[in-house]
Amino acid sequence: MTEQMKMKNDEYDEVLEPPINFSMVEDGIFRSSFPQPSNFPFLKSLNLRSIIYLCPEPYPEENLEFLRSQNIQLLQFGIEGKTEPSVSILKDTILEALKILIDVRNHPVLIHCKRGKHRTGCLVGCLRKFQNWCLSSVFEEYQRFAGVKSRPTDLRFIEGFDIMLLRQCLYSIIYQYQGYGSNKRRLLYKEDNLQKPQTMKV
């Protein structure tokens, strides 16, 4: 067997193991739990451009090395897991994450928290509202991933999330791209109060 054939066989023998709770949300958008090193070959097959990380804890160095090797951008939105953040802080953070999520320049993108259930479920649930899903379908999807650990507070947050904030932001961006000179329309909410993602140079 030639060396080239051996290398090809080694590639085929490589097991592609997705992270727990992995699923495709939409074409170019994926969700999962926190990726482990055993998941790196699978993630490589997705050709990711970005990762939206919803936890406040620092990203492990081993994961950062993988992102560097694949030229994947890490965008971190620190949402506390055990202690429930205030609704206003959560709303602002989810809104900022949604703006990153729907920008196709960041696709293919993977959303993840620790277990891919609650924080990831809230972000995907708000995306579904933006896509005009009916609330019962949004809740059904959330509960499919959260299982017995479904949180009523998450469902109430998704139900009360005002998706018009995102639409207003998009209208403003469209006006800016059209170039109306010094009379550009401003965002319809105060950007200064919103949490910015931590774009980590990996």
Image (cartoon, rainbow, N blue to C red):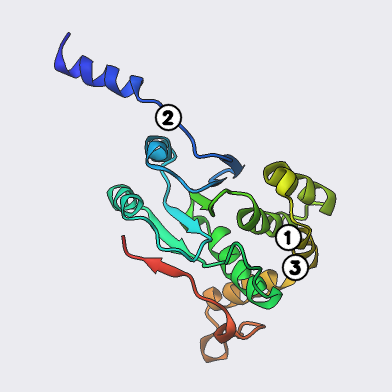
Farthest residue in the bottom direction?
182
Tell me the tag on residue 154. 1
Vertical placement of residue 56 versus 184, above or below? above
Residue 88: where, in percent of width, then height? 68, 77
Vertical placement of residue 143 versus 103, above or below? above
How crowded is the residue under tag 3: few (<14 C-alpha within 10 Å), some, or many (20+)?
Answer: many
Q: Earlier in the sequence, mark 3 or mark 2?
A: 2
Residue 166: where, in percent of width, then height? 67, 70
Amino acid at pointer 2:
Leu
Q: Secondary structure at mark 2?
A: loop
**Nearer to me, 131 or 202:** 202
Q: CA distance from mark 1 to mark 2?
A: 32 Å
Farthest residue in the front direction?
82
Quadrant of the image for the C terminus? bottom left
Amino acid at pointer 3:
Phe
Q: What residue sits right under mark 3 in the picture? A: 161
Q: Quadrant location of residue 96?
A: bottom right
Please tell me which residue is depicted at 33% across the width and 54% down the height of the picture. Answer: 64
Amino acid at pointer 1:
Asp
Quadrant of the image for the N terminus? top left
